[in-house]
Each structure stands twice: as C-alpha cells, then as structure tokens.
Amino acid sequence: MSSTGGGNKHALNWTSILVAIPVGFAASLVTLGFRLLIELINQLLFNSQQDITQAMTVYPWFFWPLIVGAGGVIAGFFLKYATSIEQKETVKTDYLEVINARLDAVPTKTSLFRALSSIASIGSGASIGKEGPMVQLSALCGSMMGRYCFKSLALKNSDVVAMAAAAGLSSVYHAPLASAIFVAEIAFGISALQRLIPLIIASAVAVLTMWSLGYRSAIYPFADIQFQLTPATVALTVIVGLAAGLAGWLMISLIGKSKALFSRVKSLP
C-alpha cells in the first residue's frame, strides 16, 4: 500500500509508517520490562536499587567472586541449552540475520533462553552489557508482531524487525536518530530515505514512551559536568579518544585470542 501511484518503488509506504508507532511502543515496553527485572533481582539479592557495582558492597569482598561465579554457572546452563537448539535446528538467534533476510523470523525459544542467560549474568554482577539482550528481545517482539498482528499487510517481517530493533536501541540510549541510522545501515543502507523514516518514527515513539513513564535518562547516564571548549580540553579529548581506541583494539585482540583458546574445548557453547 503506497501513498502514490505509478508503481514508483521509491514511494513512501504509509503502511509501514503507521505500523512503526505500535512497534516502537511495544519495543520500549519490552526493554523497560527487562530493565525492571534486573532491578528486581538486585532488590532480592542485595536489598538495594542501586547499580550492581554499589549494591554488591552489602556483602564482604570475598563473596563477590562467588556471587558472580554462581550467576555465571546459571547463565551457562541457559546458554548451553540455547546453543544446543541452534545447532540442532541450524539457525542463529541474532536479529541481524532476520534484518539481512537470512532468516524469516527471530527464533523465539533461543532468544528467550539467551535473555535468561543474560539476566543471570547481569543480575549477579557480570560485566556484560544490558543493551544487547534488550535489543534482541525488542526484535523478537517486532518479529512476533509482524507474523501475527501485521501478516495481512504488505510488509516484510524483516522491516518490522528493523523497526523494533531501532526502537529497542533508542529506548536504551535515548538517541532515536542514531539508533535508526545504525540499524538502517545494517539492514538496507541509509540511501533509501523512504525506508529510514519508519525506523526513525519507531525510535522516536520508543523514547517518548520511556519519557512518559518517567525514564528520562539513558540506561547509562552521562556525568553531570560542564565542558569548557578550550585548547587544553580539546587536547585532552583527543588524547582520551586515542587511548580509548587503543584500549578497544587491545580488548578486541584479547577477545579473539580467548575465543581461539576456548574453541578447543568442544563442550563449550
């Protein structure tokens, strides 16, 4: 269903724009639910609503590796089960596989078990990001909406998943334009503006929903400081950027070497 006639393949699809609104709303609720679940686990384990790095201090320091280790064991069981399903069914859980049209839909069971693995890790204090499982669950929500709610519409499931992924990313970082462009670059490139617009709308709806519910800051808030534009601060910014880039390169190299070493253990997922 297009807004213009003549068979112009670049015509703006009003159906996708209207679909982007409920998709963005649903994706924001999914990310919020994940966020609240982590906070609930912190409350149960540490009787605190503070960040895990502060909440864990209620226990003596020698308990910290035990708590993280126990969470890692639980996470490992969930991850092992998810990967066994993936190997059996020869599918990948990553929502990018759907956006890139290598899968028809985001796998439900493996996505949920991987999310449980992330919850066990994050809730026990492991140093992994919260945004990954949030975006994956948002993409799963979008995939289910595309299959069951919008199946009668002339929309590809991959487009709905892309909207949901952009909305989930936006819910985490509160950066709707950057989130939409990031997903669009992966999905179909940003040259097709008419396909980028639904992603921007879904991302904006997600941020507005989070704001309406009282979550006006990103999940990783910035420090409340004033930046003075002087030669010294600019030089310091360049130095920090170079140092961060070098640290990132070293981290990626270490991760690659670790994967190569652990790949020799056949029982690992």
Image (cartoon, grey):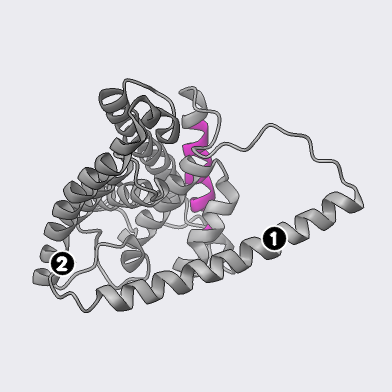
Which portion, as a residue range, is magenta?
196-209
10 Å crowding of disc 2: few (<14), some (14-19), many (20+): some
The disc at residue 132 is none
10 Å crowding of disc 1: few (<14), some (14-19), many (20+): few
- Percent position of residue 79, x then y: 19, 57
Q: Amino acid at mark 1?
A: Gly
In this picture, residue 154 sits left or right of residue 177: left
Image position of 94 with respect to 20: above or below: below
**Badge nearest the viewer, 2 or 1:** 1
Which residue is rendered at x = 13% and y = 53% of the image?
A: 77
- Percent position of residue 128, x then y: 38, 51
Circle 2 sits in a helix, a strand or a loop, which is it? helix
Q: In the current view of this chain or complex, which residue is farthest to the right?
A: 231
Q: Amino acid at mark 2?
A: Glu
Circle 1 sits in a helix, a strand or a loop, which is it? helix
Which quadrant is home to the C terminus?
A: bottom left
The disc at residue 86 is 2
C-alpha span from label 2 to label 1: 38 Å
- Residue 50 visible here: yes
The disc at residue 241 is 1
Which residue is rendered at x = 28% and y = 51% of the image?
A: 140
Q: Is residue 133 magenta?
A: no
Q: In the current view of this chain or complex, which residue is farthest to the left?
A: 88
Image position of 160 with respect to 191: above or below: above
